[in-house]
Image (cartoon, helix red, strand yellow):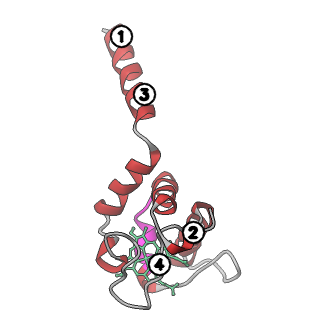
Amino acid sequence: MYRKKYLLACISLLWAAQVPAQQVGAQVWQQYNCASCHGDDALSAQSPEYPVLAGQHADYLEQTLLAYQRGQKQEVGGANVRKNPVMGAMAANLSTVEIKQVSQWLASLPSPLSHSR
Ligand code: HEC
């Protein structure tokens, strides 16, 4: 019984390791309907107020999403806190892992922002 569970756990770990982080990031993007504002390609936003995300540095995107989460928790302002009612509400839904995954996927997308890399 325990052996079977152990085996299953090993198989699922192996499987998870083989799914590229970027692909998981695309699922996060779809799950939370981020495209409704930022566009399917994260490039053709619905409005000029919505920033281009495709090709942006992953660590930059990650930090912005964490900053929106802090803003949503009403943490005191500063460089690491962003207060925005729309993105605060969106970021609050994401786990730290999902933030990393979606940021990596966005950074991998073709974009004029990534031309120098
Ligand atoms: C309802 C529209 C809307 C939706 C849905 C939305 N965003 Fe945004 N997003 C915005 C707006 C507006 C801004 C700019 C906010 C500001 O001025 O700080 C923004 C900013 C961002 C930024 C900061 C980019 C930068 O260069 O500063 C990131 C990252 C981001 N969004 C990711 C996401 C992700 C990931 C999702 C899905 C979980 C998402 N957004 C869903 C409207 C939206």
The amino acid type, in three-letter code, at marker 4 is Val
The amino acid type, in three-letter code, at marker 2 is His
Residue 13's tag is: 3
Which residue corresponds to mark 4? 52
Confirm whether the magenta stretch covers residue 90.
Answer: yes
- For the point 43% across and 61% down, the residue is 94
Label 4 CA crowd tier, 10 Å (few <14, some 14–19, many 20+):
some
Question: Which of the two discs, 4 and 2, sits closer to the camera?
Answer: 2
C-alpha distance separating marks 4 and 2: 14 Å
Question: Which of the two discs, 2 and 1, sits closer to the camera?
Answer: 2
Q: Earlier in the sequence, mark 1 or mark 3?
A: 1
C-alpha distance separating marks 2 and 1: 51 Å
C-alpha distance separating marks 4 and 3: 34 Å
Q: Mark 4 vs ligand 1: CB under 8 Å?
A: yes
Which residues, given as a range, are shown in magenta? Answer: 87-95
- Determine the secondary structure under disc 1: helix
Q: Earlier in the sequence, mark 2 or mark 1?
A: 1
C-alpha distance separating marks 1 and 3: 16 Å
- Determine the secondary structure under disc 2: loop
C-alpha distance separating marks 2 and 3: 35 Å
- Please identify the quarter of the rendering in which residue 13 is found: top left
Which residue corresponds to mark 1? 2
Q: Position of residue 43 (x, y in %)?
A: 41, 76
Label 1 CA crowd tier, 10 Å (few <14, some 14–19, many 20+):
few
Total numbered circles: 4
Label 2 CA crowd tier, 10 Å (few <14, some 14–19, many 20+):
few
- Determine the secondary structure under disc 4: loop
- Locate the N terminus and report the quarter of the image it occupies: top left
